Image (cartoon, rainbow, N blue to C red):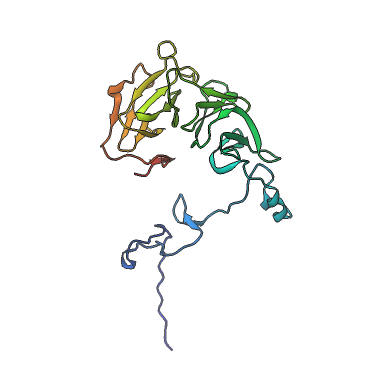
Amino acid sequence: MIRENRRFQTIAFQGGLDLESTPLKLGSGALILCQNYEVKAGGGYTRVGGYERFDGQASPSAAEDIEAARALIQTVPGSGKILGAHWFAGSVYAFRNIADGTAAKMYKSSASGWEEVTTPVLQPDGKYEFINHNFYGATSLQRMYGVDGVNKAFMFDGTTFTQLIPPGTTTEPRHIAAHSNHLFLSYDQGQYLHSGIGEPTAWDVATEGAGAGGTGDDIVGMRTTVGGALAFFMRNKVSMLYGSSKADWTSNDLRKQQDQAGAIEHSIQDLGDMFYLD
């Protein structure tokens, strides 16, 4: 009788898809081929979740006749790509150019599909960026704020769409952040403005606590860091703004890291730590 000796080793699935390393240099658990799998946040792999059409109506995958339910789902009205989409107060809001491409409109998901939201006339082809924030005390005063680079910044409460127009501005804001209970807007040429404390509609520098500054490079994004500073991401550097109001932040407090190490616009993601592409 021949005894068969076998040894077993446990290998954790980790490391992701590695198409660059040679096979002998691959770490244990790394993949050389996969389809429809992704790395889990806590390690290992999981199947990529499926996608289905959405406009606020009942999910097609929950219906008895899936194909019939799917056929009822509408695309966002208009033409061209979706300019921006955002979750606020239990609904999805989307922006898209109208059929002839001469303006943009805002739509809300609902049980009957996409519904147009009343707004001022919006210029087409913006690239929208949004935040939700409550600058006030009551829980019912959460608002959506947004910018797109071609229209005025706006505030939306679920019913009323209000454009924010800081005095003296000649271009439109590209990026937005809520920091230390101020609303920050960034503009071309590395310029930024912030509202008064707790007042996202207050922009008078002399009487309402608003302020302005410059970074010396084009701002591609703004995020509040874990340490409580506001990070200004630029194409060639990252700067940190410390303090809680214009009473204790000045141009001297805008501290830059090493030059030539910045971020690509719209690549910044807060996933516990801040990640961005350069």
Up/down of 201 relative to 176, above or below: above
Quadrant of the rendering where the N terminus is positioned: bottom left
For image coordinates 27% across by 23% down, the residue present is 252
Please provide percent x and percent y for residue 199: 49, 18
Q: Which is more toward the observer, 50 or 101?
A: 101
Q: Is residue 255 left or right of residue 276?
A: left
Up/down of 155 relative to 109, above or below: above
For image coordinates 50% across by 19% down, the residue present is 201
| Picture mark count | 0
Which residue is farthest bottom? 1
Quadrant of the rendering where the C terminus is positioned: top left
Please provide percent x and percent y for residue 160: 61, 24
Up/down of 266 relative to 202, above or below: below
Which residue is farthest top? 207
Q: Is residue 271 left or right of residue 250?
A: right
Q: Which is more toward the observer, 98 or 273?
A: 98
Q: Which is more toward the observer, 140 or 205?
A: 205
Please provide percent x and percent y for residue 246: 37, 18
For image coordinates 50% across by 33% down, the residue present is 130
Please provide percent x and percent y for residue 43: 44, 53
Q: Which is more toward the observer, 1 or 126?
A: 126
For image coordinates 27% across by 39% down, the residue present is 260
Q: To which quarter of the image does residue 112 belong? A: top right
Q: To which quarter of the image does residue 5 belong? A: bottom left
